[in-house]
Structures are given as C-alpha cells and as structure tokens.
Image (tube, coloured by chain):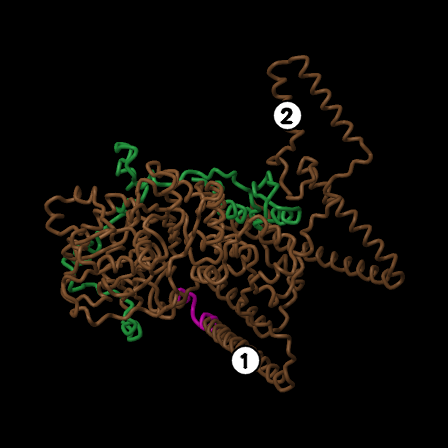
Amino acid sequence: MPSYSITRPSRQEDYARFSPNTPIVIDNGGSSFRIGWAGESDPRVTFRNVVQRPRHKATGETVTIVGDHDPSLMKYFDCTRTSFRSPFDNNVVYQFEIMEYVLDYGFERLGANLQVDHPILMTECICNPLSSRSKMAELLFETYGVPSIAFGVDAVFSYKLNQQFGRCNEDGLAICSGFSASHVIPIVKGEPVTEACCRTNIGGYHVTNYLKQLLSLKYPYHMSSITWEKAEELKMEHCYVAMDFASELQLFQKGNEETKEKTRCWQLPWVPPTQGDVPSEEELARRAALKEKQGQRLRDMAAARKSIRITELENELNGLEDLLQQLDEVEEPEVSSILSGTKFFSRQEIESAILRVTQSLRKAKGEPSEPEEKNDSSLSEKYPLVSVPDELLSPEQLKEKKRQIFLKTTSEGRLLAKRKRFEEESLREKQNQLDEEKRLENPELYLEQLHDRYRELSEKVELRKRVKTNGNQNLSGGVGRGERLSAAQKERMRLLTSAAFDRGKVLMERIDKSADIKLQVDIDPNFVPKSDLVPPQATPEFSKFRPQSLEDFKIVLGVERFRCPEVLFQPNMIGIDQAGLDEMAGISLRRLDRVDDPIKDDITKSILVTGGSALLPGLLPRLEAGIRQIRPYLSPLTVVRACDPILDAWRGASIYANSPQFSLQTLSMQDYYEKGESLLWQYQIKYTI
Amino acid sequence: MEAEVVGSEMVLPAALPFKRVQMSDKYPKGQSRGRHWKHLKQILQAENYASLPAHEPNYLNIESPPSLYPSKKYCDMTGFEAPYTDPRTKLRYANPDVFKRVRSLPNEYVQRYLALRNAAIILR
C-alpha cells in the first residue's frame, strides 16, 4: 500500500560512489515502485507505479509525469484526456511503454548519469508469463544496457527476510495479499514450491475500489469528494476484518451502543447557508440608488434614441417636401429629369412616401395616429374606379380597378374586424362587471359556482384523455395507440389471434369465459381504479425541499468498515468466483501432493502473512480461524505477520542481492544475446544461497 | 515551463543520458501507435499453455478454483444478509425498508449496484 504523501522523491547524489558490482534492487509492485541499492536497509526511491501524460498548457507539448504529484501544480497541465495509467494488467506487466517511463524515472531519481552499469534484481509475480518476462529483459538489456538481471518473487523474498529474523521456519507458507492479486506460496526447505502455489485475483485494489463505489452510491451528492486517494486513505485508517462476518453483520443490523461506537464519520467541509441577514438601512438605500441610477440611464438612452429618430424623420420629410415643391415649380418635361435623380418614379409615389413619413413621425412623437374613420368618407374618392363599369375603361385602368377593388375589400374587412373586436371587448367588460357584482353580492355562492365550473371542465378534459388512452388510466400518461396492453389484455389478444387461425371450440369457450370475467369486472360496483387510491404524487419526503445541513455532508462508515475487506475472504461478493484467502491456504496444502502430512504440519506452524493488505487489523486472527477450520483437528497452526508487510519484499531482495553468490543467479547480457528468449523459459533463481 | 513546475522536478526529461535508445527514437512522434500492447488475456492466449504438460505450473493453472463454501447472498445496499431478491431489479435486499429504497432507485444506480458484484447487464 502506498502512502499518499505528495512529497516527490529527490534525486540521489551518490550514484557514482557505488561500484559497478553493486546490484540495483527494484521491487516492481502493482501499487508502488521501489528502487535502491543492494545491502541497504531501505529503498532509496519509492513512488506510485503510475504514469500520467498530460499536455503542458503553455507550450502545448505532451509531458510525462511519473508517480504522484502535487495537485496544485496540475493547473499548468491539461489533463482532460489523460488519466493515471499503470503498466500492469492484473499483476503482470503488459504496457512496456509505461514501464519504460517508470524505469526512466526510477533510474533518474537514483542518480544514474551516463549508464546503468549495475546488475539488476527485479521482482515479478510468480509464474509470470514468458512474454512479459522476456519483454522486460529486452527493455533492460537493450534500452538501458544493464550488464545482468535476475527475477525473483516478492513474497518469497519477504519470507526469506522474516526467516532470518526468526519469525518463520524453513518450511512454511507465505500468504501475500498484494495490490491486484493474492498469492499463497508454500515453501519447502527454503524454496518455493511453484506447482503448489495458488492465486486469487483479489487484492488491495479491489477493497479500495469496493469502498469507493459503495460510498459514492450511498452518497451520490458527494461523488466528486470520494476520490480514489481518499478511499485508499479511509481504508487504511478505518477498515478492519471482522472475526466473524455474519455475527458482526447481525450486530450492526440490530444497531446498539457498540455499533455506534464502531461507526466512523467523515465530515466533509460544509458552509452553513447564509441566513437571510437583514441588510442595513444605508445598504438598502445604496441599492435603491443604484437601481434608480441604472433605470435613469436606460430611460436617457431611450429618449436619446427617440430624439434621433424624430430628427431623422423630420429631415426626410423636409427633403420630400422640397422635392414636391421643385416639381410644382418646373415644367412637365423636366419632371422626369428631376425624378431620375431620386428613387421615385412619379408624383404619387412621393406623396405616399410623405404620408408614410408623417405617420411614423407622429408615432415617434407619441401623438395619436389619425383615426381611420376619417378615411371612411373618402373611401369612394380613394377608389374612384370601383363604381365605373368595365366597358368604359382601358386595359390599364382595368388593372388599376382590380387593384382598387382588392384594397377596398381588405380595408373594409379590417374595419369590420375592428368593430367586432370592440363589441366583444365591451361585452366582456359587461360580463366582468356582472361577475364582480355577483361576487360582491354573495361571495360563497360565487365561489361554489366557480368550483362547479372547474369540475365540469376538468371532467371534460379527463374524458378526452381517457378516449386517447383506450380507457386505461395509466399514471405515466402514455398515449392511446402505442399503449402497452395489460397482461390480461395481452392474453385475450393472443387467444383471439390464435382463434382466428384455428377456430377450435375449446378456444372459443375460453374466450367467452374470459369475456365473462371481463364483463364482471366492468359492472362490479365496488371496482375502484387503482390510480384513484394512490395519488399520482411522489412521496412527500422527496418532493419537500429541505435545506442542506451538516448531517448531509457527513459520510458514515458503518458496515462498510468490515464489508470491504471481507472481499478478501469472499471474492464472490464482488463477483469473482474464486476461493478466499483462508481457503487458498487449504488449496495450496492440498496441491502439495508429494509432501507428507508431518511436513504439512510443519508448514502450518509457520504461516507468514505479507503484502499491503496484511496491515488490515483483524486479518490475522480471521485467517487463523479460517485455516483452522480446514486443517485436521488439533493440528498445529501459527500465523504471523511480516515485520513490515510492505517493505519486507524489497529488504529481502536487497539482502539476497548483496550476498556474494548473487552473481551466479543472474542472466548476463552476453547470455541473452546468445540464447534469447529460451534462456528465460526455465529460468528460476535459487532463493537459498 | 513555469518555475514552479521545474522546481518540483515532476516532469520526466525527454532524453536521458543513461539510456541507449531514447524514448523519442523508439516511439516516434506523430506515428500512430494504435494499441499494440497485448492485454493479459491475449498474452496468456499467445503463451499457449494448453500445449504444455499439465503438471507444469503456469500463470493460468495456479489460479485458485471456485470456493467450496456455499456463496452467501448479501444485501446490495446495506450489506446485511439478504433473504430476498427483487424480481424486477434483481437486487438483493435485507428487509422491507431497503426494498422501498430499492424500488425508488433509478435504473442507472441499479445497474451500478449490480455491476459491483459483476451481475449487471452489459449491452454491447
């Protein structure tokens, strides 16, 4: 398990101090990458085994960031399309491009200058697929030019270290619950028995992810606050393994004092809503003044616009009048020459334009437009051709006549509509007055009448709706034709259709019967449609608005505290159909078919639990209880936790690489170029040297 | 680059002196790389474990078998033991109170609860 401090590892300065024979030890774990020198007690550099490749906002280039980083610095980067990427798929390295970035960073932090001329011991999972291992060798040899490499299993290194500390024996069982998988590896005579080990694809990642998902489903409003990092932190701080899961659940289901003590709360930052504090006098005055000022500005602007428009129109009018005057003064033949300079073609057009401009001027000035009734008298004068018979007119005049007739009828129609509207308005006014009188006279009666009318109308609406929905009163308001039929109706339809194909007597009878039933239902006086009983409203607690309180920002960890780690023992809970940690120990012992029972007893006498999940409180007693169930009655059993479940793998590897015989276990670059992949095929280091 | 970013040394340098092949030479820019990394499933398929003798340990056959204990059913929302299953949403629930909450859940949440135990319907 990584610690989420954002302090970035600093570059080591003393790289040159180490002789080329000193191996570099790398613990390439699913969650963190540790690199350091063989023989030292702690890794020099540790960081989260992830890579992010955001785009730098200022320069636009894609940069590589390995490990965790300060989120406050991310404002310089565009992370929209990049998230954390891990080189691992399950517990096998598959993305060697990302692995290369991680290694780059690791060597760079370790202080490598010109070349990485040290042997390398790297951890991998047990039974690592050959292609993954050979790609890793290729990367180390060809890209970094490493002289020699060795691969080992982290859990075994951890076991060997604890064996040196005297916590476990030569024969034993290493139970390693890592980030993405858990292993049980039996160790006989100091060597791991690969064919008897077993793996379940469950680890700390699944626990954290389960916790995160559960919390974000429980508190959908706070989904953004429940990040992966936070869930990891909560897991490390509060999760525990229940000794007896079922009874612990029952305890919580009953909910007494004890469970209250066991429940943890995580209070999210919460700002109480500002209580409608009354603004002071002067504040109010200030606001009113501001409002008034803004209003005045708007009014001024409108006035200015209006005056501009008026002057514009006046200018236009003056121009037109001048033009008309000119036309009056000159002789007939010159008229066309004057008109050609303007956009008008005749005197009439100018006149009508003047009329239009004066009207809009009047409008702009806010004077009432001249009443249209005035035109009434002049109707016959305006349309002189209408009353003249067709025979007396030239074709052009006929055309003009048609136009005049059209104009006349439309204007007449407009007048009529206006008159009608006026009448209606007066009628409505009268009605309103009557209503008002009635209301004043007898308010209750008036109200009742109104209610009656409302009911009548809504009934009508309802009726229409029912017609639309085939008489089905469905709450969702589906429409008639697309409406789904109820089960009974469907059955009826099915029968009818099948009956249409084979007119069997029996079927007809059944139809009749079902029709009878339907009839009974229809005339049943007690029958009440369901929708009348249940008002189509959401339950009041949801619809009612409630201001958010401190309680709403509290994230309660009750059952989750032990529910999430339980997936290690019951992978079925998250849909992984494999045995849990305690059963795995049994499976591993069963797979040790060539080992006698007394030795198995020896093995169970020294069971070492390592890996990040071993830090969960309560894991050991639970594991012991679980394994005791599997083992024969009164067989010996000792379960111990590794000294430091997280760092022991690296420390063990460091001691191993520091031993003088280490160089015999490595693969040199020369071998690699001579034999290639086949060299790695049967490669297995001896852990006892 | 901003001084803050440079100071934190968070960005990996593009070229490192100790490498024989630089990243930019290996994965040239602009060349569409596609997805050329085999996932674990493909790796395991390519390993062709079936052709090897069965007693030889490999990544696949060291995997633990399904549990021998009968799997217990737990309430999807509360985590308590669940005697009931809602036939409509397929969610398990512990008591009537939870059932009410189950029924008021929007479908998206139902699917997410189901996905937690790998039982969601995935439409492809």
State which quarter of the image contains the C terminus of chain B. Answer: top left
User: Where is residue A571 drawn, in percent x and y?
Assistant: 46, 45
Judging depth in this view, the residue of A370 and A530 nearest the camera is: A530
Judging depth in this view, the residue of A394 and B52 nearest the camera is: B52
Q: Which residue is mark 2?
A: A493
Residue B24 appearing in the image:
no
User: Where is residue A354 drawn, in percent x and y?
Assistant: 52, 68
Q: Is residue A539 left or right of residue A154?
A: right
Task: Please name the color used to draw chain A.
Answer: brown
Q: Is residue A205 left or right of residue B75?
A: left
Element type at mark 2: helix
Q: Is residue A15 above or below residue A298?
A: above
User: Where is residue B123 drawn, in percent x and y?
Assistant: 45, 40
Q: Is residue A7 above or below residue A404?
A: below
Amino acid type for the residue under numbered disc 2:
Met
Q: Residue at x 11, y 47 (%)?
A: A673
Mark pair 2, 1: CA separation: 72 Å
Q: Is residue A180 magenta?
A: no
Tag 2 near tag 1, CB within 8 Å = no
Judging depth in this view, the residue of A268 and A388 nearest the camera is: A268
Report the span colored magenta: A324-336
Chain rendered green: B
Q: Is residue A331 magenta?
A: yes
Amino acid type for the residue under numbered disc 1:
Arg
Residue A526 appearing in the image:
yes
Question: How many residues crowd mark 2 within 10 Å: few (<14), some (14–19), many (20+)?
Answer: some
Q: Which residue is mark 1?
A: A297
